[in-house]
Image (cartoon, grey):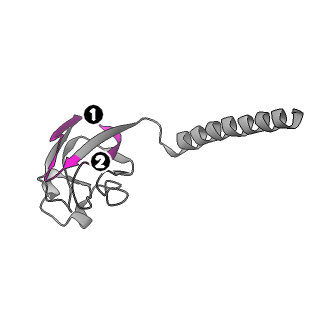
Amino acid sequence: MSNFKNFRSISLFVFVMGLFFAQTINAQTTEKDVTIIELIQTPGVFTTQELDLKPGKYQFRIVNQNVDHELGFVIQKAEDAKKDVAKSAVPNSFASKTVKAGEVAYTGVVDLTKGEYVYSCPLNPTPHYSIKVQ
């Protein structure tokens, strides 16, 4: 019985320490003062169609809600919206992976300065949606 109690105590300790270290690792991999914005894509549209933001660091959480193919995400300056996405994307603004139905992906941390931007999905033919940073 004593061995069982020791095993249970050690198991509980390992479990609690695992939770502590997991939270510590997550805190270290997320930059301080970063605002996460969730954007949901449905067939052909984003549910949020305009953002008014303050200058700062943002990370975008992209959700594929019932689109039957993989999605992407990118932010461009508004004046570059008709240019090649790969060449005109705001740094770190691509989704980290293509997003399958029911899945989520994040961009890197995007530093938005005052100006006008657009976001879209280059894989799901969506319009360009406005981001105003003031």
Residue type at mark 1 is Lys
Quadrant where the N terminus is found in the figure = top right
Residue at horizontal 84 percent and vertical 35 percent from the top: 6
Residue visible at 17% across and 41% down in the picture: 47
SS under mark 1: loop
**Amino acid type assigned to the residue bearing label 2 in the image:** Val
Which residue, as the protein is rendered here, is positioned at the far right?
2
Q: Residue 27 carries which label?
A: none
Prevailing secondary structure of the magenta residues: strand
Look at the image and say whether residue 51 sits in the magenta stretch. Answer: yes
* Spot occupied by residue 89 in the image (x, y as percentages of width and height): 26, 59
Above/below status of 104 relative to 114: below
- Do residues under tags 1 and 2 come within 8 Å of each other at their CB atoms? no
Q: Nearer the viewer, residue 86 or 113?
A: 86
On the picture, is 28 further left or further right than 62?
Answer: right
Give the labeled residue for mark 2. 63
Q: How crowded is mark 2: few (under 14 residues within 10 Å), some or many (20 or more)?
A: many
Real-space Cα distance between discs 1 and 2?
Answer: 23 Å
Label 2 element class: strand
Number of marks:
2
Picture quadrant where residue 115 is located: top left
Q: Is residue 119 magenta?
A: no
Q: Which of marks 1 and 2 is nearer the N terminus?
A: 1
Q: Which mark is residue 54?
A: 1
- Rendered residue at 47%/37% (across/down): 32
Q: Nearer the viewer, residue 18 or 78?
A: 18
Looking at the rendering, the stretch of residues picked out in magenta corresponds to 41-65
- x%, y% of residue 68? 22, 59
Quarter of the image with the C terminus in it? top left
Q: How crowded is mark 1: few (under 14 residues within 10 Å), some or many (20 or more)?
A: some
Q: Residue at image x 39%, y 47%?
A: 109
